[in-house]
Amino acid sequence: MDTEVLRKVGLTENEIKIYLNLLKAGSSTAYEIGKQTGIYRVHVYDKLEQLMDKGLVTHIYKGAKKYFQATSPSKIKHYLEDKKRELETQEQAVEAILPELEAMSNLPKEDTFVEVFKGNEGLKYFLKDIIKTKQEVLITGIDDQKYQEALPIFMKQYFRDLRINNIKERVITIKKPGIFLFEKELAPTTYYRFLTEKQFNPTNTFVYGNKVVIVTWGTPVMAVMIKNEAIAETYRSHFEQLWEIALRRL
């Protein structure tokens, strides 16, 4: 069989070996898969995890033993459809921040420093940077629930550090029933105001010190950090205008 097409859709060499082995075997333990494919068992578990994330492998228990089995080959098409949706989401996220990125191109390059962070570790990096900066944070377009789901333990530490360092957060979010907000007991230095859907810009933006961070919740989540005094001041001024017209309560 020509397995090149499987490589082109995003499967690694070892993932292909394991998937084909399971299609033939029906179900196998990680030990049996390693023995039949020649892949070290520690790598077998890693690749099985990735194949399960792609929807191409499932597992069952027979007694105390865990057996893995390949899903229907038609799932490969579903995997491609999922990838297509992820790309569409990422494209929409990029479209949302294009105006800000294009505005940067008109600034002297030596005045602007940009970093891009991917995944939950990227979120942690700039949230830790907020603590280091020790200045007020202005936030718009936020969905607190996404941060709680992505970083449940870290967010408690983050709010603890805000409190210890007496760092104030002001958050403008959307006015709608059931919106998730961090409780005052957990986040005593965080203050919320609300805009209607027509007034609200959903782009998740943080402004602190001389930095602006734009977060897009694609797969993976991405954070673009722009370090520029003029850009930060522009965002800060716009935030203050919105803060004045925003409602104090839902």
Image (cartoon, rainbow, N blue to C red):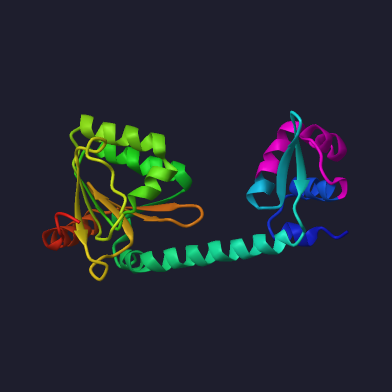
Q: Is 38 located above or below residue 209 in the figure? A: above
> Residue 208 at x, y = what percent?
24, 47
Residue 182: horizontal and vertical position, in percent? Answer: 28, 43
- Residue 98 quadrant: bottom left
Residue located at (76% from left, 41% from top): 68
Q: Residue at x 79, y 45 (%)?
A: 18
Instruction: Please state, as top left, top right, bottom left or bottom right, where the C terminus lies in the image.
Output: bottom left
Whole-percent x, y for residue 186 in the image: 26, 36
Indicate whether 61 appears above or below 233.
Answer: above
Magenta span contains residue 9: no
For the record, the magenta segment spans 24-49
Q: Is residue 108 left or right of residue 14?
A: left
Q: Quadrant of the N terminus?
A: bottom right
User: Residue 47 colored magenta?
Assistant: yes
Q: Main secondary structure of the magenta part?
A: helix
**Outermost residue toward the front?**
63
Q: Residue furthest bottom?
A: 198
**Residue at image point 35% right, 43% down:** 126
The picture places residue 100, in percent across and down from the top left corner, at 32, 65
